[in-house]
Amino acid sequence: MIEKLLEDLNEQQREAVTYFDSPLLILAGAGSGKTRVITYKIAYMIEKFGYEPERILAVTFTNKAAREMKERVEQLLKGKAGVFVATFHSFCVRLLKSHSIRVGYKPNFLIIDSDDKKNLLKNIMKEMNLDTDLYNPVAIGSMISNVKNGLFSAEAMEFRGYDRFNDIMETYNNKLREMNAFDFDDLLFYAKKLLTEHDDIRKRYSSFFQYVLIDEYQDTNEIQYEITKALTIDKGNVCVVGDEDQCIYTWRGANINNILNFEKDFPGAKVIKLEKNYRCSGVILSAANAVIAHNKIRKGKKLFTDNEDGEPIRLFVGVNDQEEAYFVGKTVKRLIDTEIRPSDIAIFYRTNAQSRSIEDALRRLGINYQIVGGLKFYERKEIKDIIAYLRVILFDEDRLSIFRIFNTPKRGLGAAAEEKLKKLLDEGRGNLEALKVLLDTAPTRQKEGIKELIHIIEEGREKVNILKPYELVRFITIAARYEDYLRKEYREDWESRLENIRELGNTLEEFAERTGFKGEDLFLEFLNTITLSSDQDEMEEAEKVTLMTVHASKGLEFPVVFITGLEEGLFPHVRSLDSAEQIEEERRLFYVAITRAKKLLILTRAESRRFFGTYRESEPSRFLEEIPPNLIKKVMRKDRPSTTQTDKVSYVKKDKKPKIVFHKKFGKGVVRRVEGIGDNAKVTAFFANHGEKTIIMKFLKVLA
DNA sequence: GGGGCAAAATTTTTT
DNA sequence: ATTTTGCCCC
């Protein structure tokens, strides 16, 4: 049966699937059927050689990709396969679950996100009385990350004038250890430590896994390389798949040399190039080839395709970013009005800040869209608050979360009380005990607030293994009077925030059903899973246009792609102009963007763009000149944006009859204004007995 | 301790 | 231009 499947493949793909004699590097050009090759290879191993699925390790870049790969293998094998598909981070978590004791951690560890990391560093540096100009928490955080990833030593930082760097990092690591918590880098760092410094562990896993596949190998860092090597160097049972032309994460430690030097690092390695592109139109592929040919740091591939040339690439130049956004919106609308589905369209930009003007334009034109990246569901304040309560209930030593909820909602506990709590915790007490001591010494007007907190923690701990997960969320919401707090602090959108908390409860229930975890374990697993969720993992499959940064678009494809902001200083970004290497990375980024497009590619730029409130002239991106002019058709300005474009509110059209809506509490109302679209639109309506109210659309019924 | 105001920061890309 | 932070006063 598997032999029959091989007939679907071209010669190079087939060779890539069936080759097992030595370590294998598959240089997979964009759209060359890489996922197909990996899934067929896994199916082939199982069918032909009888490999045990759970002893095949496949590492992907996102959880979404992992899920899809698993599904596709199971489709091929017509049944459950149980292949071990993970991201590097989730693989490391699995490893640490079993062996964390060896690196001085308990197995029920917590993973902290970058927000926690920032707060922790902020506290540490405040305590050390450091100049916040030089010692910026986020900057120091990324330096710590670089040190943990082996990019440079702590001494190098001290040499650069950060003479307290080592102290900060040590304190930071100690605090994490006291909290039994890992940051993102620690997961890789300690997993690598397990595999390289504990030979029994390395032997156990390298003999357990019959084969290891690593996808997106061009974006692996030093530590990930070491992990790969530790797992496979004995038997050479490894296949890495990647494309050096798509390496776009060197700034966070990805080492392009991992892929460039694979043959040196894995003796006897074989290299197979996949150069036939099945995704892009001829025109789009020619443009991509022409652009990437300007790079020097590469192994060199030349993609070709049997696809038709297709439509020319369009280029639009707007006077400013708003006109650019308006053009994008209008064009999207026209495409949707004809034959294209919204979910077939993606709009890319270099920096998150650019999304704003595009969003405004789409909203004004009534186009449904989703943003991949940006503020994630679990990063919303109300969600982080409730999660902090959960964490305090679960982890007595979680110092970050106790401070987050200490006076949220307000319960009369200010800076002085916080300072006292801090002292008590510094003396080595757990959260609960510290609060109890605090209660004894607190002035009368603070006692109630502290009692409330103690009650939530004690009661929560009793209930955590008894209540259903969403009931615990409800208990917290009620016990902390969180709904009152939302009503008071967020008059505009408290309802949708409360709805988000309910959604958190639902997600917990689903997670419980799907994974079978219960009680404390459930919450712990859930928290760690959401911390490791990527932007793409949160992507919806709804009928919406998708907006995202070029980085976030990695691995995806769309029939229609817009690449916006093609200007010097923006794309390539101004912070990447100092070196040839950085320019090459920007070019790879542009190459990634181009090759996401299947049928139609639309490029845009603006002659002037707003930065920090003031307009600045901008030159066309050098990358535009690298595309052969005969592939491009310039689009002329036609309809200008309306002169009232500063006005973000779209008023109800006058020629239409007034809409009447119904609300559970306020009754019938007449719509005055609508801001936004869909379920999340803010509707301002006049209610006979309650006056004008602004309500989220999903809480309203539209009456005929 | 919290509300109100002025000053300062914001924009690279993220697991 | 908008959002976040920091400071002052009640």
Image: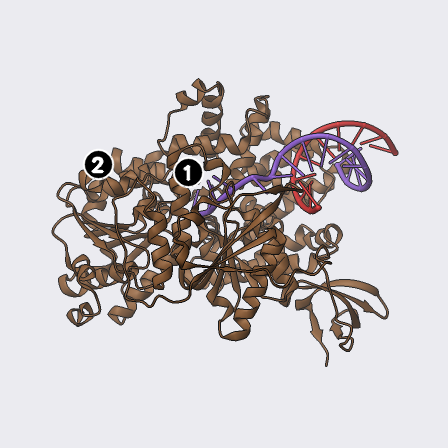
Chain colours: A brown, B purple, C red
Q: Tell me the subunit letter for badge 1.
A: A
Name the side, left or right, on which A94 lies relative to A620. left
* Viewport quadrant of the N terminus of chain A: bottom left
Badge 2 marks a residue whose secondary structure is: helix
- Residue drawn at the location 50% of the way across and 49% of the way down: A566
Name the side, left or right, on which A100 lies relative to A437. left
Q: Measuring from the top left, give residue A654's x and y in whole percent.
A: 78, 73
Badge 1 marks a residue whose secondary structure is: helix
> Label 1 sits on what residue type?
Trp
Q: Look at the image and tell me whether residue A28 can be seen.
A: yes
Q: Mark 1 points at which residue?
A: A251
Q: In which quarter of the image is residue A266?
A: top left
Say yes or no: labels 2 and 1 on the same chain.
Answer: yes
Q: Measuring from the top left, give residue A304's x and y in whole percent.
A: 27, 59
- Residue drawn at the location 70% of the way across and 57% of the way down: A645
- Circle count: 2
Q: Measuring from the top left, give residue A619's x and y in whole percent.
A: 53, 43
Indicate which disc residue A584 carries. none
> Is label 2 in contact with label 1 (beta carbons under 8 Å)?
no
Q: Measuring from the top left, give residue A224's x and y in whole percent.
A: 31, 41
Mark 2 closeness class: few <14, some 14–19, many ≥20 residues within 10 Å: few
Decide: is A146 above or below A467.
above
